[in-house]
Amino acid sequence: MSRAELIGYAAAACVFVTFYMKTMVPLRIAGIVSNVLFIAYGYDLLAYPVLILISCCCRSTSSGCARC
């Protein structure tokens, strides 16, 4: 298993964990961690669509409105 696959699985696991969060702070932390891992995954594979999508979502959620 390559490093990129491990990062991708870790990012997917973080997203899965967010479905079980009951309070906002752990939800935000898990979301940030998953976004960082997805950015690392996209960068490692040079998957520009993944990088663009996650970058747009990170930018829109940090401003308080979720457009993605």
Image (spheres, rainbow, N blue to C red):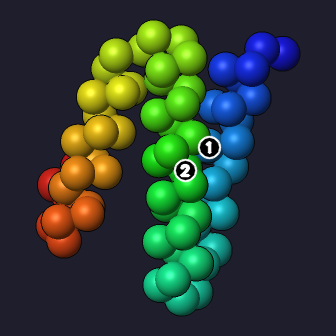
Q: Position of residue 22 (x, y in %)?
A: 58, 87
Question: Tag 2, which secondary structure?
Answer: helix
For marks 2 and 1, the one nearer the N-term is 1
Question: Does residue 68 appear left or right of residue 40 in this picture?
Answer: left
Residue nearer the viewer, 68 or 44? 44
Task: List the single residue furthest toward the right.
Answer: 1
Question: Does residue 59 appear left or right of residue 51 in this picture?
Answer: left
Question: Tag 1, which secondary structure?
Answer: helix
Question: Does residue 52 appear left or right of residue 15 in this picture?
Answer: left
The disc at residue 34 is: 2
- The amino acid type found where label 2 is placed reads Ser
Identify the image quadrant of the N terminus: top right
Mark 1 lies on residue: 12
- The amino acid type found where label 1 is placed reads Ala
Q: Position of residue 41 (x, y in %)?
A: 56, 27
Q: Are marks 2 and 1 in contact (CB under 8 Å)?
A: yes
Q: Position of residue 14 (x, y in %)?
A: 63, 54
Question: Does residue 63 appear left or right of residue 37 in this picture?
Answer: left
For the image, the number of numbered tags is 2
